[in-house]
């Protein structure tokens, strides 16, 4: 019983001791902010200014030709002549290449001969039809005079109908052979490969050459590509955050590594109505005039799009922004009392260096360095600019030991 009582007394003493330690620790924690606040924090400040601020988006992309197509033959054959090369200018309807046409020319001659045979057969059938028609008319006249029998009239009529059917078949054969001749002539014309397009300028340029003379080509095998580079299209991709800011007709400034220090202008002409699920980006096309033909398809470009511009607005350095209690704000400097007060702000345009303060109206200076140590009303100290700018006096270097020894000897 005494042992149990002793254990209880020890537990009570330990509990009292722990309570005293906890109480003193909590009191020290309560006093620490006050002590911390009483210590002035060294900070750097910057003035609140009035300036023009821009909301500019920076994007990268590539140039593509406004129009691109490959010239290809509609029929198979050996490439006999290639009349253009890379970089050559091509006019609308210009002859690009010639295929070996011997086989197709022979087909034209064969189709023409078959047409002549069909025409001769038509003449023969027409003559036979005329004879059978006269026989039928004579049989009808004799039958009306009751000289010819009914059976003779029926035979003449049957012969006339048969010759009429043969004449129609011969006429259809002539039409068929004419169509075959036209088809052969069209196939022969396909050996003359031309570049043709509907809209755009009269001249374009040959971009790539895919085959050489003598190559055996399949139908629709590309020979050369034709590009329209009088006006190029810059293709960029915008993320979801900037998608709502992009508008058709917006001016775009472009730069490229091929021409350092030079800018090109364009305007947005098309915006994709969807964002790709894999990248969360939308395709935007920018029309770029290229009258001097300096820009080429495939070049890497950087696009600068000004989404908004606010003139004569209140701005603070971006480094001045901080958060307290999930509120965005700045620490405004009270130079008379040497204190910093936290002011919640509503931001407008924010770029890489400055931030627009839409609300409230600010003036004076704001803390740009050291605000992570501040609370509302904290004491601050500002750097002594005069002391920082003043340079310390230079100390003359000590004389070498050898010089010291020589001087001491001279004195002696």
Image (cartoon, rainbow, N blue to C red):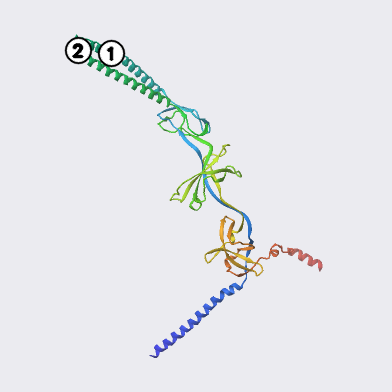
Q: Which mark is residue 412?
A: none
Looking at the rendered image, the quarter that the N terminus falls into is bottom left
N-terminal label among 2 and 1:
1
Q: Is residue 181 left or right of residue 156?
A: right
Q: Quick one: SS at disc 2?
A: helix
- Does residue 191 lie above or below 4 as drawn? above
Looking at the figure, which quarter contains the C terminus? bottom right
The crowd level at tag 2 (other Cα within 10 Å; few <14, some 14-19, many 20+) is some
Q: Give the camera-side residue of 196 and 308.
A: 308
Outermost residue, right direction?
Answer: 411
Residue displayed at 50% across by 82% down: 20
Of all residues shown, which one is farthest toward the front? 145
Q: Give the percent coordinates (x, y) of residue 116.
A: 35, 17
Which one is nearer the viewer's eye here, 95 or 6?
A: 95
The answer for how far apart the CA atoms under marks 2 and 1 are is 18 Å
Residue 277 vs 94, above or below: the answer is below
SS at badge 1: helix
Residue 17 position (above or below residue 137): below
Of residues 190 and 76, which is closer to you in this image? Answer: 190
Q: Which residue is mark 1?
A: 128
Q: Residue at x 52, y 77 (%)?
A: 26
Q: Which mark is residue 152?
A: 2
**Residue 369 locus on image (x, y percent):** 60, 63
From the viewer's perspective, is 234 left or right of 150?
Answer: right
Extreme residue in the bottom direction: 2
Q: Residue 169: give x, y in percent of width and height.
A: 29, 20
Q: x%, y% of residue 384?
A: 68, 65
At 38% from the left and 21% from the top, the residue drawn is: 108
């Amino acid at each position: 019983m005494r042992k149990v009582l002793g254990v209880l007394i020890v537990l009570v003493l330990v509990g009292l001791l722990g309570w005293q330690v906890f109480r003193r620790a909590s009191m020290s924690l309560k006093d620490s902010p006050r002590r911390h606040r009483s210590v002035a924090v060294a900070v750097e400040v910057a003035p609140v200014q009035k300036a023009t601020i821009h909301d500019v988006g920076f994007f990268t992309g590539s140039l593509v030709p406004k129009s691109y197509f490959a010239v290809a033959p509609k029929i198979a054959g050996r490439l006999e002549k290639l009349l253009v090369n890379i970089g050559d200018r091509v006019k609308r309807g210009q002859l690009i290449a010639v295929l070996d046409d011997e086989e197709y020319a022979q087909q034209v001659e064969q189709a023409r001969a078959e047409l002549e045979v069909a025409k001769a057969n038509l003449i023969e059938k027409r003559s036979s039809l005329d004879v059978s028609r006269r026989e039928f008319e004579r049989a009808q006249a004799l039958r009306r005079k009751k000289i010819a029998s009914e059976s003779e009239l029926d035979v003449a009529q049957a012969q006339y109908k048969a010759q009429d059917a043969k004449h129609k078949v011969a006429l259809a054969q002539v039409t068929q052979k004419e169509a075959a001749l036209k088809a052969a002539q069209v196939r022969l014309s396909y050996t003359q490969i031309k570049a043709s397009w509907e809209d755009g300028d009269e001249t374009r340029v040959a971009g790539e050459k895919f085959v050489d003379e003598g190559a055996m080509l399949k139908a629709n095998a590309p020979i050369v590509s034709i590009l329209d580079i009088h006006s190029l299209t810059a293709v960029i991709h915008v993320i979801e955050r900037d998608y709502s800011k992009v508008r058709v007709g917006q001016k775009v400034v472009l730069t490229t590594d091929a021409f350092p220090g030079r800018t090109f202008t364009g305007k947005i002409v098309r915006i994709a109505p969807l964002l790709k699920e894999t990248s969360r980006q939308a395709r935007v096309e920018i029309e770029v005039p290229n009258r001097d033909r300096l820009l080429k398809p495939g070049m890497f470009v950087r696009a600068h799009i000004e989404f908004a511009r606010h003139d004569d607005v209140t701005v603070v350095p971006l480094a001045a922004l901080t958060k307290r209690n999930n509120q965005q704000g700045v620490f405004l400097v009270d130079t008379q009392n040497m204190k910093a007060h936290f002011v919640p702000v509503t931001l407008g345009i924010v770029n890489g260096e400055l931030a627009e303060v839409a609300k409230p109206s600010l003036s004076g200076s704001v803390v740009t360095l050291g605000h992570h140590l501040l609370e509302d009303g904290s004491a601050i100290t500002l750097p002594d600019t005069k002391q920082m700018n003043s340079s310390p006096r230079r100390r003359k270097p000590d004389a070498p030991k050898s010089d010291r020894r020589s001087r001491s000897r001279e004195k002696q």
